[in-house]
Image (cartoon, rainbow, N blue to C red):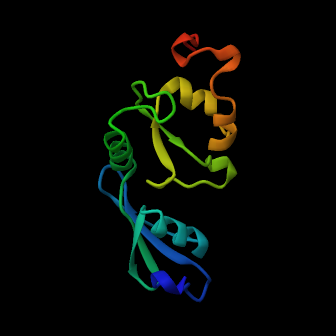
């Protein structure tokens, strides 16, 4: 934690501040390891030794990822307008720019809680089908 300048409070936490989509400020105490991940994966910055600040509201984060990826699905290269976690939240992934990509609805739903390696091992879809041949859900 020292390499990014954070030191937990006496309670063992790091304070995190942010803003909602409407601009209202919020605050919560989080685990130091999570704080470290959020800072090193470009989702937060260090304010002082006990506090970090989220860089994006939910809406801002969504727009950041979609615009960064030019509304192009990371997996099939078609139009995408959803956000997918490369390492799913269910497996310990976090909502950070380094862990999130633009995905089309079909790829996002197909990947579900698989990690990137498992999903790509199933690529291409069964029986050599192309993504364009998949039925719409």
Does residue 115 appear in this view? no
x and y, in percent, of residue 40 in the image: 48, 68
Quadrant of the snapshot with the C terminus: top right
Total of numbered circles in the picture?
0
Q: Which sits in the foreground, 59 or 21? A: 59
Quarter of the rendering containing residue 129: top right
Indicate left or right for 113 with 96 as reference. Answer: right
Task: Classify 93 as above or below 65.
Answer: below
Q: In the rendering, at what x and y percent does residue 102 appear?
A: 44, 38
Q: Is residue 62 left or right of residue 131?
A: left
Q: Is residue 126 left or right of residue 35?
A: right
Residue 116's place in the image compared with 73, above or below, is below
Tell me residue 85's x, y (percent): 55, 45
Dividing the image into 4 quarters, which one contains the N terminus? Answer: bottom right
Look at the image and tell me whether residue 137 can be seen: yes
The residue furthest bottom is 10
Residue at (46, 42) in percent of width and height = 101
Taking the view exactly as shown, the residue that stands out farthest to the front is: 128
Residue 38: x percent and y percent?
Answer: 49, 65
Query: 91 or 131: which is nearer to us?
Result: 131
Residue beneath the point at 29% across and 55% down: 23
Q: Where 132 sits versus 74, above or below?
A: above
Q: Residue at x 49, y 84 (%)?
A: 3
């Amino acid at each position: 934690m020292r390499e990014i300048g954070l030191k937990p409070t006496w309670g063992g936490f790091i304070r995190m501040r942010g803003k909602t989509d409407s601009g209202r400020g919020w605050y919560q105490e989080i685990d130091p390891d999570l704080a470290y991940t959020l800072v090193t994966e470009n989702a937060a910055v260090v304010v002082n030794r006990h506090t970090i600040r989220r860089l994006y509201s939910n809406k801002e984060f969504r727009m950041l990822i979609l615009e960064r990826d030019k509304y192009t699905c990371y997996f099939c290269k078609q139009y995408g307008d959803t956000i997918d976690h490369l390492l799913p939240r269910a497996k310990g992934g976090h909502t950070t720019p380094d862990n999130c990509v633009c995905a089309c609805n079909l790829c996002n739903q197909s990947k579900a809680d698989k990690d990137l390696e498992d999903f790509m091992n199933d690529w291409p879809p069964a029986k050599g089908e192309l993504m364009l041949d998949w039925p719409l859900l």
